[in-house]
């Protein structure tokens, strides 16, 4: 039988850890990824801030990091994590590899969404005498807002997925909980309950994302 | 008075890969007078868009100088370029409205750039929407509007900062004929009431014939002809202009039509230009009647251009060779005559 009296405080803590990791990763990587994505978009050939060498560097960097399986990335980036966070173990320190990886993924998604903005609209803004940075924040991002919200929703789910691997470095969270109290103790009920909770989080995120995107699209 | 826009020896080359360059605009000299509506025509790829984009410095010339008002675009820094662009409005074939902003938001955007206060912006936007006739659409979004309404928003937005110059890049090409007429009427009104100098790029003859004072014909990056609309169209000097005019007027038989006509009309076939001058037309009739040559009208097309008749009539001339020759020579003394000869092959 499952001893929920003992388990539920642990489950609650794991839930909070997951929320903590996902929240901060989304906040940090969301902002950095937006900057990276805009930089990728703007520095490409014919872009607003065309800069071949910078674009090449960023592009290669994203292409190198993105395909690395996250579980390997966490260990590979260990020395850097130690340097930045002071430790490689725990819920807080795992924010570093999570944010780093999510930044690159978000950067690429932001870039792709910006590319889909009609260049004619950018030209119209240029023809009105808007500065490049003004065009970026007052035309480009608002015009791509609908797809961007959907992109961030997609990333949110990927980050929840990432957070499950945080258990490997003592990060805790729902993934760790499911492994420690479910899988390793042959308790399928615990695993199932954890899965249901994760599915609910993801569903809620998708629902909110879709709503916001529809509102932003106005089409 | 100095022209408002002046291009001298202007070329624009784009890299086309493998070290080659494409000269989209090639050695153009052009003046646009203050208060005029100038039409730039030519087939696609003739360099019209590039030429016009050099006026608001969206493109800078690789050679030559573009002077707008008192500024030379190539000498301006980033800030100067932005100021210049703020003083030249532009409208587009695909309207290029901001989908994320309401109609009022679109029209107010250039005012925001120009640093207008919220209060002044609101007043100006209301005034502009009233002027273009879509005051009731202020709160709607572009996706909710028809093509004609979208272009009105585009026009209101382009006029927001009261520019002296308005550039229209194929502004009516995506609209149906009825809407085109309305939008052209609006452009004409802007020119008359606000004194805005307008440069329109188009491949549509109707646009030029209904609103333009001056027409500029471009072919392969060069300006091949320029002058008052009627003069250029009724007496095109360059073969490319002639081809363009006839391709939109359909007043001359195509080669296929000509081949079919020849089966029935074995005589010599000439096309006679019809102009505004009544005396010329009388003279043409008299010349034809005065020779011992049988003439048959086999093709033709006449329409109005700048409220003057304009087109051509194609005749078959049958008779003795010397008589036909004399008739053609007499006609040439009065108007433009071209013999449509059989193809060499």
Image: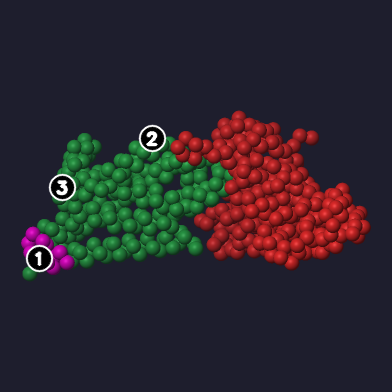
Pinpoint the chain carrying mark 2. Answer: A
**On the image, numbered disc 1 is attached to which residue?**
A187
Classify mark 2: residues with Cα within 10 Å, few (<14), some (14-19) or many (20+): few
Kindly identify which numbered label has been placed on residue B10.
none
Kindly identify which numbered label has been placed on residue A169.
3
**On the image, numbered disc 2 is attached to which residue?**
A53
Q: Colour of chain A?
A: green
Structural distance between the alpha carbons of marks 1 and 3? 23 Å
Marks 1 and 3 close (CB-CB < 8 Å): no
Instruction: Identify the mark nearer the N-term, 2 or 1.
Output: 2
Q: Main secondary structure of the magenta part?
A: helix
- The range drawn in magenta is A182-192
Residue A133 horizontal/vertical position (percent): 48, 41
Q: Which-is-in-front pick, marks 3 and 2?
A: 2
Q: Colour of chain B?
A: red
B300 or B72, nearer to the observer = B300
Give the secondary structure at mark 3: helix
Structural distance between the alpha carbons of marks 3 and 2? 36 Å
Residue at the (70%, 47%) spot, across then down: B239
């Amino acid at each position: 039988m499952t001893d929920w009296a003992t388990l539920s405080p642990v489950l609650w803590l794991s839930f909070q850890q997951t929320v903590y990791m996902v929240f901060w990763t989304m906040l940090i990587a969301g902002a950095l990824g937006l900057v990276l994505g805009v930089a990728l978009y703007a520095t490409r050939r014919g872009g607003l801030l065309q800069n071949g060498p910078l674009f090449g560097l960023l592009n290669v960097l994203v292409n190198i990091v993105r395909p690395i399986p996250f579980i390997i990335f966490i260990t590979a980036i260990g020395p850097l994590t130690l340097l930045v966070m002071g430790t490689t173990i725990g819920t807080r320190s795992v924010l570093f590899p999570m944010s780093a990886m999510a930044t690159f993924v978000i950067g690429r998604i932001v870039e792709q969404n910006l590319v889909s903005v009609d260049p004619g609209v950018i030209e119209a803004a240029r023809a009105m005498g808007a500065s490049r940075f003004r065009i970026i924040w007052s035309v480009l991002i608002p015009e791509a807002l609908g797809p961007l919200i959907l992109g961030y929703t997609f990333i949110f789910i990927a980050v929840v997925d990432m957070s499950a691997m945080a258990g490997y470095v003592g990060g805790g969270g729902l993934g760790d909980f499911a492994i420690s109290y479910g899988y390793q103790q042959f308790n399928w009920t615990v695993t199932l309950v954890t899965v249901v909770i994760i599915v609910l989080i993801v569903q809620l995120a998708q629902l909110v994302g879709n709503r916001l995107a529809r509102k932003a699209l106005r089409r | 008075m100095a022209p408002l826009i002046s291009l001298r020896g202007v070329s624009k080359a784009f890299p086309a890969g493998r070290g080659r360059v494409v000269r989209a605009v090639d050695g153009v000299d052009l003046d646009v007078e203050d208060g005029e509506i100038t039409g730039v025509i030519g087939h696609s790829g003739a360099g019209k868009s590039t030429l016009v984009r050099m006026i608001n410095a969206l493109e800078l010339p690789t050679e030559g100088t573009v002077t707008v008002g008192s500024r030379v675009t190539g000498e301006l820094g980033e800030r100067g370029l932005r100021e210049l662009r703020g003083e030249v409005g532009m409208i587009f074939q695909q309207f290029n409205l901001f989908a994320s902003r309401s109609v009022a938001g679109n029209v107010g955007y250039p005012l925001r750039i120009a640093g207008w206060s919220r209060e002044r912006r609101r007043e100006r936007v209301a005034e502009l929407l009233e002027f273009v006739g879509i005051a009731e659409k202020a709160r709607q979004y572009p996706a909710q509007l028809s093509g004609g309404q979208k272009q009105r928003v585009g026009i209101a937005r382009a006029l927001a900062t009261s520019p002296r110059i308005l550039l229209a890049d194929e502004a009516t090409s995506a609209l149906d004929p009825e809407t085109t007429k309305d939008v052209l009427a609006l452009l004409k009104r802007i020119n008359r009431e606000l004194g805005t100098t307008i440069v329109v790029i188009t491949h549509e003859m109707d646009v030029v014939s209904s609103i333009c004072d001056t027409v500029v014909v471009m072919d392969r990056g060069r300006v091949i002809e320029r002058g008052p609309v009627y003069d250029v169209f009724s007496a095109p000097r360059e073969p490319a202009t002639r081809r363009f005019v006839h391709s939109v007027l359909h007043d001359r038989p195509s080669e296929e039509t000509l081949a079919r006509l020849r089966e029935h009309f074995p005589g010599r076939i000439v096309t006679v230009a019809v102009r505004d001058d009544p005396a010329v037309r009388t003279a043409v009739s008299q010349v034809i009647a005065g020779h011992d040559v049988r003439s048959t009208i086999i093709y033709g097309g006449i329409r109005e251009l700048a409220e003057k008749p304009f087109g051509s009539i194609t005749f078959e001339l049958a008779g003795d060779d010397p008589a036909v020759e004399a008739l053609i020579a007499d006609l040439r003394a009065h108007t433009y005559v071209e013999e449509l000869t059989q193809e060499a092959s």
